[in-house]
């Protein structure tokens, strides 16, 4: 049974509201930002910030299979991912699950099982967990199945990507890695190569397939984009068919084209924190500096979102309200979620309580429910609860 929302007034903290840091209280009632006298929690020494909204994360894959040969049940992985997100101030998160010819944990069978498991887990969830489908372009024969899954599970976000060339190159230069890839999909190397070549044989039908999906997504209200655009021409193609979100452009030209036509640009927070791409692509920080990045996503590491925001502040590239908007306000705008991303009356009470000295998330509140509580903040919340009980007894 879902936990009832808390009714509290958080006082003494520095609050990000109306685009600036302010010294004021935040009242929570019935899962929304409210007004009026309520039991108080003193959060002097803390920031109260809008809950983080993560548009793309695949950290859940580590919980599905901590080792490639050691898978765990999907429900276990969802529970661990949910708590992982909450502990890092994330209140809304899209888990990026592949829909690919690759098979195994990245194939349609696993995607459908994952979506069903998430539906079953929803009542237990601490955060708002959703699925972004990463649709490989060369999956033409799955069109009806994909659209049925989108409708059945109310999917609201899809991105197109094409890893086929990478697979073909891998077969030529890294047989050991290819063997691992095949084994993870439950195939022999020969079987896996046959699947790769069959996917390549769909090339002629891919444009019609993507346009069919795009038309259906427009009808269903699904947001969609593309992943790993290598150049402006690729980004322009996807933009023209309606795939407006530019996720992880690998070169500046792709990001520049997206900016020119008004498409939102997403980059990985780990790229910002580490000072560059782990795969040799363009540095996210360079795009942020040139204002060619609208929002940051966790990619493969949830803690990087908060760390990236403060990194941008420390590098004097922007102030905290501007940096935090890249992981809260802008993602909400991009995925059309008007009820979150800012702290304001009537909006969802999605909040991250961050220790101002250590910059550690010590409390996460999702729709008024406490999803994570630790450290000194936990002591303060518990003390407030004891006082409420004492007053009620009197």
Image (cartoon, rainbow, N blue to C red):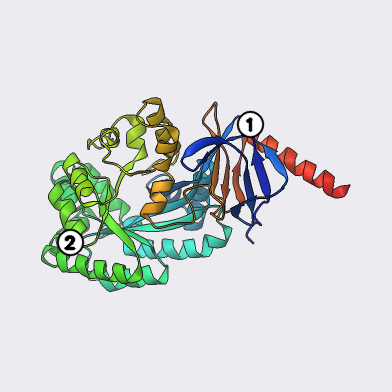
Q: Closest to the observer: 62 or 303? A: 303
Label 1 crowd (10 A; few <14 / some 14-19 / many >=20): some
Q: Which residue is drawn at 15% across and 52% down?
A: 234
Numbered tag placed on residue 44 in the rendering: 1
Question: Is any part of residue 366 visible from this angle?
Answer: yes
Residue 21 image label: none
Q: Position of residue 89 (x, y in %)?
A: 51, 42
Task: Work out whether 249 lies above or below 44.
Answer: below
Is residue 308 shown left or right of residue 228? Answer: right
Q: Position of residue 72 (x, y in %)?
A: 47, 52
Q: Calculate the distance from the C-alpha at mark 2 to the C-alpha at mark 1.
A: 58 Å
Tell me the mark number nearer the camera, choosing from 2 and 1: 1
Q: In this view, does 389 lie to the left or right of 154?
A: right
Please, what secondary structure does the residue beneath circle 1 have?
loop
User: Mark 2 or mark 1: which comes first in sequence?
Assistant: 1
Q: In which quarter of the image is the N terminus?
A: bottom right
Q: Where is residue 69 in the image (x, y as percent from the top left)?
A: 39, 48
Q: Who is closer to the viewer here, 62 or 333?
A: 333
Q: Is residue 282 placed above or below 234 in the rendered structure?
A: above
In the image shown, does 17 or 371 lie closer to the viewer?
A: 17
Residue 216: image quadrant is: bottom left
Task: Find disc 2 in the rendering and name its residue.
Answer: 199
- Place of residue 25 in the rendered image (x, y in percent of width and height, measured from the top left): 62, 40
């Amino acid at each position: 049974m879902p936990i009832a929302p808390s009714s509290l007034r958080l006082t003494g903290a520095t609050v990000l509201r109306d685009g600036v840091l302010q010294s004021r209280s935040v009242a929570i009632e019935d899962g929304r930002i409210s007004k009026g006298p309520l039991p108080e929690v003193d959060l002097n020494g803390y920031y109260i910030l809008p809950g983080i909204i993560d548009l793309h994360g695949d950290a859940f894959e580590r919980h599905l299979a901590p080792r490639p040969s050691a898978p765990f049940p999907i429900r276990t992985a969802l529970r661990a991912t949910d708590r992982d997100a909450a502990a890092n101030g994330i209140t809304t998160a899209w888990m990026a699950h592949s829909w690919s010819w690759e098979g195994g944990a990245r194939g349609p069978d696993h995607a459908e099982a994952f979506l069903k498991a998430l539906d079953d887990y929803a009542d237990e969830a601490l955060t708002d967990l959703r699925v972004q489908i990463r649709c490989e372009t060369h999956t033409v024969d799955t069109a009806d199945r994909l659209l049925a899954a989108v409708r059945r599970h109310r999917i609201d976000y899809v991105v197109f990507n094409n890893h086929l060339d990478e697979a073909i190159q891998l077969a030529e230069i890294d047989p050991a890695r290819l063997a691992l890839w095949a084994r993870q999909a439950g195939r022999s190397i020969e079987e896996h190569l046959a699947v790769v070549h069959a996917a390549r044989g769909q090339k002629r039908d891919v444009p019609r397939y993507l346009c069919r999906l795009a038309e259906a997504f427009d009808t269903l209200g699904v947001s969609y984009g593309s992943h790993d655009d290598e150049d402006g021409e690729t980004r322009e193609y996807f933009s023209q068919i309606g795939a407006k979100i530019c996720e992880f452009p690998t070169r500046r030209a792709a990001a520049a084209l997206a900016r020119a036509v008004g498409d939102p640009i997403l980059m990985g927070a780990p790229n910002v924190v580490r000072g560059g791409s782990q795969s040799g692509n363009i540095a996210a920080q360079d795009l942020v500096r040139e204002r060619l990045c609208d929002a940051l996503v966790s990619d493969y590491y949830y803690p990087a979102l908060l760390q990236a925001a403060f990194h941008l502040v420390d590098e004097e590239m922007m102030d905290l309200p501007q940096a935090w908007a890249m992981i809260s306000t802008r993602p909400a705008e991009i995925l059309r979620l008007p009820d979150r991303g800012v702290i304001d009356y009537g909006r969802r009470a999605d909040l991250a309580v961050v220790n101002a000295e250590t910059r550690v998330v010590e409390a996460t509140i999702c729709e008024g429910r406490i999803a994570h509580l630790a450290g000194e903040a936990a002591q303060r919340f518990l003390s407030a609860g004891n006082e409420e009980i004492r007053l009620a007894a009197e």
